[in-house]
Image (cartoon, helix red, strand yellow):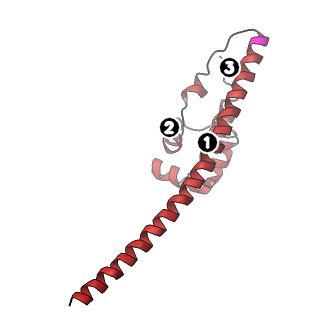
Amino acid sequence: MKFEGVGESFGALVRTARENRQWTQADLAKRLGAELGKEVNPLAITRTEAGKRPVPLEEVAALAHLLNLELDPLLNPPRVHGSTGDLRRRAEKLRDEINRGHQREVELMAAYASVSQQLRRVRTEKDELERELQSVERALKHADS
C-alpha cells in the first residue's frame, strides 16, 4: 500500500472542514490548543493544510474530533477494481450523481430561503396582532372600570 500524499490529503480535509465552519487558521489553532492543553501556532495549521508538516497522532485525533473528520477512508482507501472503461463509466456516473445532489441542494436552499422569509413575515404579523390585542384588552379593562 502506498502512503504518498496522505499528508496532503489530510491537509485538504482539514482545510475544507475548517473553511466549512468559517474558521480562520488562527481560530482552529486556538481551538486545537485548547483541545490539546497547549499553545498551537497558526503557522502549524498553515503547514498542516499544505501537507508540509508531519502531524503527531494526538493532534490528528484532536483535529478529527474538532472538525468531525472521518479518517478511515484516508488511511484505508477503498480498493477499486475494474477495467479502465468500467472505472471511467463509474466515475462519470458518480459525477452525474454529485451534480444532481448539488442541484437538489441549491433548490432546497432556495426553498429554505423562501420559507424563512415567509416565517419572518408571519412572526412579524403575529407580534403586531399580539400588541394590538394587548391594547384592545387594556382598553376593555379601562372601559369596564
Q: Residue at x 70, y 29 (%)?
A: 5
Point out the frontmost of discs 1 and 2: 1
Residue 77 colored in magenta in the image: yes
Mark carried by residue 14: 1
Identity, as a three-letter code, of the amino acid under mark 3: Lys
Give SS at disc 1: helix
Residue under pointer 2: 61
Identity, as a three-letter code, of the amino acid under mark 2: Ala
Which quadrant is the C terminus positioned in? bottom left
Mark carried by residue 109: none
Residue 84 location, x and y as percent?
78, 12
Residue under pointer 3: 2
Q: Earlier in the sequence, mark 1 or mark 2?
A: 1
Identity, as a three-letter code, of the amino acid under mark 1: Val
Q: Residues within 10 Å of mark 2 (few under 14, many from 20)?
A: some
- Magenta stretch: give its range: 76-86
Q: Residue at x 35, y 76 (%)?
A: 133
81 shown above or below 36: above
Q: Residue at x 53, y 43 (%)?
A: 67
Q: Earlier in the sequence, mark 3 or mark 2?
A: 3
Observer-nearest of 13 and 122 = 122
Give SS at disc 2: helix
12 shown above or below 4: below
Give SS at disc 3: loop
